[in-house]
Amino acid sequence: MAHVQTAAAPLAPHQRPRLRAVAPDEIAGLARVADFLPPGATLLPAPPHALPALPGRPPMVGYLVLLPAEEHPPSGAAPALVAEPPAEEGPVGIDAVRRIATVDGRTLDLTYLEFELLAHLVAHPHRVHTRDQLVQTVWGYGHVGDGRTVDVHVARLRRKLGAEHRHTIQTVRRVGYKYLP
């Protein structure tokens, strides 16, 4: 079940979280950064579209620090995000913590990428995703492949959803796919 998160209050410019892009030669120093993270925090590569591109310079590598939702940020940090209930319930349920997908209460046996693809589609209902967007978002920007990879995984997902729920993943001709709860 998808949850949308919104900030509790607008932040002053000096309080806004910052995303710092680092050059590839700075990555080795990130191992030391992990020692300073709070318990339960995760250091992840930032998606390439979130990083600035400088002409004539190699692409930058950025990292995001994720904190568990139950923990409160240190004083002076950004306010906690508040989860809103999903706008629309559908037959497909996603439990990201336990990495379980269900359809009408029945647990689906999914591969890692099938789960990631289904979770992404369910988190963004009614939104049309191009094949390229899905490859970049689900497989990652370093993946070498084409839209046919997405087609094969969607076909497998539809088969696993079963005859009465396969229509929840709709094909948008010559564009991509969307999830309709």
Image (tube, helix red, strand yellow):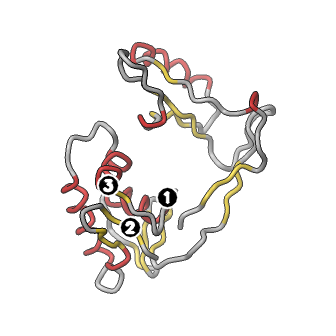
> Which numbered tag is attached to residue 169?
none
Location of mark 1 (residue): 96
* In the depicted structure, whether residue 67 falls above or below residue 29: below
Sequence-wise first label, 2 or 3: 3
Location of mark 2 (residue): 178
Residue at 42% of width from left, 77% of height from top? 103
Estimate the x, y position of residue 147 in percent, counting from the top left: 22, 54
Residue at 29% of width from left, 61% of height from top? 175
Q: Which is closer to the viewer, label 2 or label 3?
A: 2
Estimate the x, y position of residue 32 in percent, counting from the top left: 53, 18
Q: Secondary structure at mark 1?
A: loop
Q: Residues within 10 Å of mark 2 (few under 14, many from 20)?
A: many
Sequence-wise first label, 1 or 3: 1
Q: In terms of image quadrants, where is residue 136? A: top left
Whole-angstrom CA distance, mark 2 to mark 3, is 17 Å
Residue at 33% of width from left, 79% of height from top? 167
Residue at 47% of width from left, 27% of height from top? 52
Q: Secondary structure at mark 2?
A: strand
* In the depicted structure, whether residue 119 falls above or below residue 19: below
Estimate the x, y position of residue 43 in percent, counting from the top left: 51, 33
Marks 1 and 3 close (CB-CB < 8 Å): no
**Residue found at the far bottom of this picture:** 164
Q: Residue flagged by tag 3: what amino acid is it? A: Leu
Location of mark 3 (residue): 113
Count up the numbered dots.
3
